[in-house]
Image (cartoon, rainbow, N blue to C red):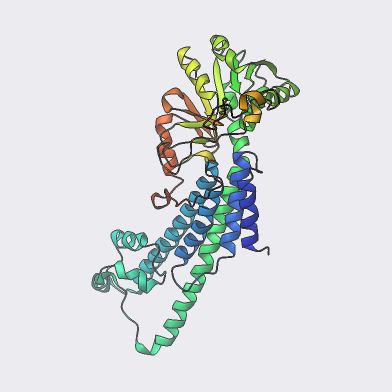
């Protein structure tokens, strides 16, 4: 089995050097790495869930610090932490329910049941909330009223009872790690199939003879449009080129290859062409808890144009892009500046870039942001792998994927970030 630390260091280097393209690939590789971390974590005699959470957090903080702008990394880390807590809670509840049944089966008549009442739902819930306590049944009962405790066995069975408890702890430890790994495998599968699940909904939203506008290049958008084409929908696509990287050129070429009628336009022509459009369909870098969208630069302009002409603005996003943080949160970096070489040729502008002033500052400054922020009021609909949702519903959807205890992860930034 490969060394976990070597895998972590290799992935950290890829994140720092921006060698992984796309949020889906980043999210999938993050989940796979955390699965390896979990599988190789040594489980203590007690507090197994706490040990797993500590291991995941320790690695997750380093991954987030390596590339804070790639929010999918933090999303997956928090999803895995949520999985650990949920699986531990499930095992705790099952253990308490089993004890409840055992207490009932030991009672011989109604009188005995009155003397030793079954565990109440409140008692089970109290024990379940203590998910990071030692998982033995005796310890779990520390939060249960004395009247709910099971009668002690005779002293002659003490040795066998101790062995039984030890075996239960060992079995529960293996069960917890197994269940967590299985749940992480399901998460990886969900990330891998998110494009297909979103694309299956295309026929419900794209109708005959419509004109669709998009900007830049997004695999999710590509699969969504092609899925509608495969369902015999006939429509036309306007693609804004997405300067300065011109990813829209790649999308336009791919759409033509798939047999879709495509028109390539400049970003500055969006407002002039939007009146001919029936719907705007775009991808997202991340979806925030308030329903706002961090998206490729230029999309806020498109959203404003769509609002001005009452054109629906639809955002496609896999569940791994749903971020539980708000855009004003200090852990969220809304933007990243790319190289000025994408905007101009240094050879042609060398005179402007010379330090001509006495204070040593260049005469020309070049700013090349990567992302835009689109507020929720400009978004008409989100389409995720679980269906279509209004922006006002996103915070409730996001709450199903994350634990409140894990919303804030310490970010150890370095001078290189």
Q: Quadrant of residue 281?
A: top right
Q: Is residue 294 left or right of residue 140?
A: right
- The answer to whether one can see residue 84 in this image is yes
Place of residue 35 in the rendered image (x, y in percent of width and height, measured from the top left): 59, 57
The structure residue drawn at horizontal position 41% and vertical position 63%, both measured from the top left corner, is 92
Which residue is painted at 43% across and 82% down in the image? 162
**Is 190 rendered above or below residue 245?**
below
Residue farthest to the bottom, as pictured: 156
202 lies left or right of 291 = right
Which quadrant is the C terminus positioned in?
top right
Is residue 189 visible in the rendered image? The answer is no
The residue that appears at 48% across and 54% down in the rendered structure is: 81
Q: Which quadrant does the N terminus fall into?
A: bottom right
Q: Is residue 6 above or below residue 310?
A: below
Number of marks in picture: 0
Q: Residue at x 59, y 13 (%)?
A: 269
As drawn, 62 above or below 204: below
Q: Nearer the viewer, residue 373 or 178?
A: 373
**Residue 220: image location, x then y, percent:** 61, 32
Residue at the farthest front position: 358
Say which of 61 and 139 sits in front: 61
Give x and y (percent) for residue 72.
Answer: 54, 43
Locate residue 137 relative to residue 61 in the image: left or right: left
Where is residue 357 shown, x and y percent of the image? Answer: 55, 27
């Amino acid at each position: 089995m490969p060394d976990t630390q070597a895998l972590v260091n290799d992935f950290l280097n890829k994140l720092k050097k921006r060698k992984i393209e796309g949020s889906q690939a980043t999210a999938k590789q993050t989940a796979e790495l955390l699965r390896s971390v979990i599988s190789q974590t040594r489980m203590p005699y007690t507090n197994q869930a706490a040990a797993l959470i500590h291991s995941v957090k320790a690695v997750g903080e380093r991954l987030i610090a390596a590339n804070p702008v790639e929010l999918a990394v933090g999303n997956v880390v928090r999803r895995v932490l949520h999985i650990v807590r949920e699986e531990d809670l499930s095992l705790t509840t099952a253990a308490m329910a089993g004890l409840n049944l055992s207490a009932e089966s030991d009672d011989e008549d109604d009188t005995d049941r009155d003397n030793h009442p079954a565990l109440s739902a409140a008692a089970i819930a109290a024990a379940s909330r203590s998910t990071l306590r030692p998982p033995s049944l005796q310890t779990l009962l520390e939060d249960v009223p004395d009247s709910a405790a099971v009668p002690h066995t005779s002293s002659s069975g003490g040795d066998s009872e101790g062995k039984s408890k030890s075996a239960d702890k060992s079995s529960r430890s293996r069960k917890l790690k197994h269940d967590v790994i299985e749940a992480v495998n399901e998460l990886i599968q969900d990330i891998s199939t998110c494009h297909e699940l979103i694309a299956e909904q295309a026929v419900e939203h794209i109708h005959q003879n419509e004109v669709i506008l998009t900007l830049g290049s997004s695999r999710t958008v590509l699969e969504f449009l092609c899925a509608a084409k495969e369902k015999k929908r006939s429509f036309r696509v306007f693609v804004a080129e997405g300067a300065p990287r011109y990813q829209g050129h790649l999308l336009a070429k791919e759409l033509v290859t798939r047999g879709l009628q495509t028109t390539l336009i400049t970003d500055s022509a969006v407002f002039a062409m939007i009146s001919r459009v029936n719907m705007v369909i775009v991808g997202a870098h991340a979806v925030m808890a308030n329903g706002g969208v961090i998206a490729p630069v230029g999309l806020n302009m498109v959203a404003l144009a769509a609002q001005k002409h009452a054109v629906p603005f639809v955002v496609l996003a896999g569940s791994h892009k749903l971020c539980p943080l708000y855009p004003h949160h200090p852990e969220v970096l809304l933007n990243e500046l790319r190289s000025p070489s994408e905007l101009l040729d240094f050879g042609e502008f060398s005179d402007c870039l010379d330090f001509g002033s006495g204070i040593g500052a260049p005469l020309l400054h070049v700013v090349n942001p990567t992302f835009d922020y689109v507020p929720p009021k400009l978004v008409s609909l989100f389409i995720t792998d679980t269906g279509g949702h209004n922006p006002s519903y996103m915070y409730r959807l996001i709450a199903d994927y994350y634990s409140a205890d894990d919303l804030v992860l310490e970010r150890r930034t370095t001078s290189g970030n």
